[in-house]
Amino acid sequence: MILEKKKTFNAFAARQGLRSTRQRDVILDVFLATHEHLSVEELYLKVKASQPGIGQATVYRTLKLFVEAGLAREMMLPDGQTRYEHQLVGEHHDHLICTGCNAIIEFEDEQIEQLQRDIAKRHGFSLTAHKMQLYGLCPTCLRATA
Amino acid sequence: MILEKKKTFNAFAARQGLRSTRQRDVILDVFLATHEHLSVEELYLKVKASQPGIGQATVYRTLKLFVEAGLAREMMLPDGQTRYEHQLVGEHHDHLICTGCNAIIEFEDEQIEQLQRDIAKRHGFSLTAHKMQLYGLCPTCLRATA
DNA sequence: CAAGTTATTGAAAGTCGTTTTCAAAAGGCC
DNA sequence: GGCCTTTTGAAAACGACTTTCAATAACTTG
Ligand SMILES: [Mn+2]
Ligand SMILES: [Mn+2]
Ligand SMILES: [Zn+2]
Ligand SMILES: [Zn+2]
């Protein structure tokens, strides 16, 4: 599936007339190898580890391309850093976040999604997106607190 | 009710050993007179209109006090500015936001809230807060687009 | 109510994540 | 290989916000 995502990006790049560069390849490889919700800085450090010359600005720029290409989703948590995660076509999830250890759990809830659509409809809105984040303490942090 | 909120703040101030200043009074008056989701800058401009000497830093500081006092809620929209709105004790609402004209509609949905608690429970989390924002086009912007 | 103590203030500097600038380097095309 | 254009990295700029600090204002006490 990594190969498939690379194809997706290459197709996007071709469509947009973007050039294929070593930097973009490396950043894509590193991004695809992760499975977390990484900040740009975190990604940058990983990228630098495998290709020291690459600049931060390029990482910032390239992650935005991934979003445009539909490979990545941008998310903002209250820590003030933009984070990126994998985006699979047609899939969506929301987040349950531990305020103790910053663990992130992903969930999908079709009932809530339906209720959200209902609310939008009731107000005559055409819904295009939504954000939902639940905050609390995970079982581990809860135990530690008690 | 404005008077009541002033009392709430004064009680909080007394409890914390805070001094009562002209600046805090003015900022509280201006805040209570609004009914929008205002950024600090917007609040600052209104405050300056009624008391030119007041500094931005004081507005930043004072709004945080209002949050601590339970009078205000802080909210972050994707525009990168922190906004403040009135917080009524024991009340909660979420937001439906028009990406065309930035209109904000408030809603409450007890069904969703219950489902959120269920999700947290299912993962063994003790839920302390949540954010939910729905994005789309309001009826007016929708008509303008068509 | 004057003097002393401490909190608060405003201006300016600092911070931090992100964006922009710009000259050098690299990619694509003939 | 040339030529034109995009991309890059470093550094500067940006913007929201926070901190610093000396002056000022609010309490307290005598
Ligand atoms: Mn996720
Ligand atoms: Mn609101
Ligand atoms: Zn935890
Ligand atoms: Zn609108």
Image: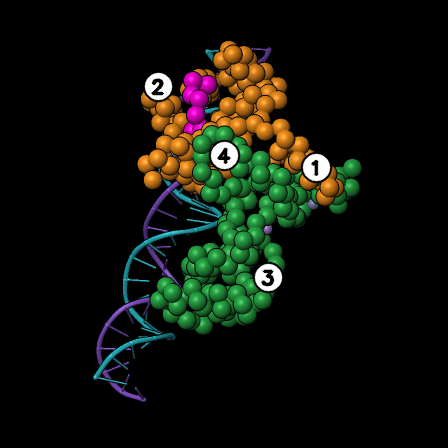
Chain colours: A orange, B green, C purple, D cyan
User: Which residue occupies 38% across, 65% down?
Assistant: B15
Is residue A36 rendered magenta in the image?
Answer: yes
The residue type indicated by label 2 comes to Ser
- Kindly report the distance in space between the C-alpha atoms of the residues bearing marks 1 and 2: 47 Å
- Kindly report the distance in space between the C-alpha atoms of the residues bearing marks 3 and 4: 35 Å
Residue A27 appearing in the image? no
Would you call the spot at circle 2 few (<14 residues within 10 Å), some (14-19), or many (20 or more)? few
Residue in front for this viewpoint, B37 or A14: B37
Label 1 residue SS: helix
The residue type indicated by label 3 comes to Thr
Residue identifier under label 2: A50
Residue identifier under label 3: B34
Residue identifier under label 1: A118
The response on whether ligand 2 sits within 8 Å of label 3 is: no
- Kindly report the distance in space between the C-alpha atoms of the residues bearing marks 2 and 4: 38 Å
Mark 1, mark 2: which one is toward the viewer?
1
Badge 3: chain ID: B
The residue type indicated by label 4 comes to Ala
Image check: B2 left or right of B21? right
Residue in front for this viewpoint, D28 or B21: D28
The residue type indicated by label 1 comes to Asp
- Kindly report the distance in space between the C-alpha atoms of the residues bearing marks 1 and 4: 23 Å
Q: Quadrant of ligand 4?
A: top right
Residue identifier under label 4: B120
Label 2 residue SS: helix
User: Which residue occupies 51% across, 12% down?
Assistant: A1
Mark 3, mark 1: which one is toward the viewer?
1
Mark 3, mark 4: which one is toward the viewer?
4
Badge 2: chain ID: A
Span colored in magenta: A32-38
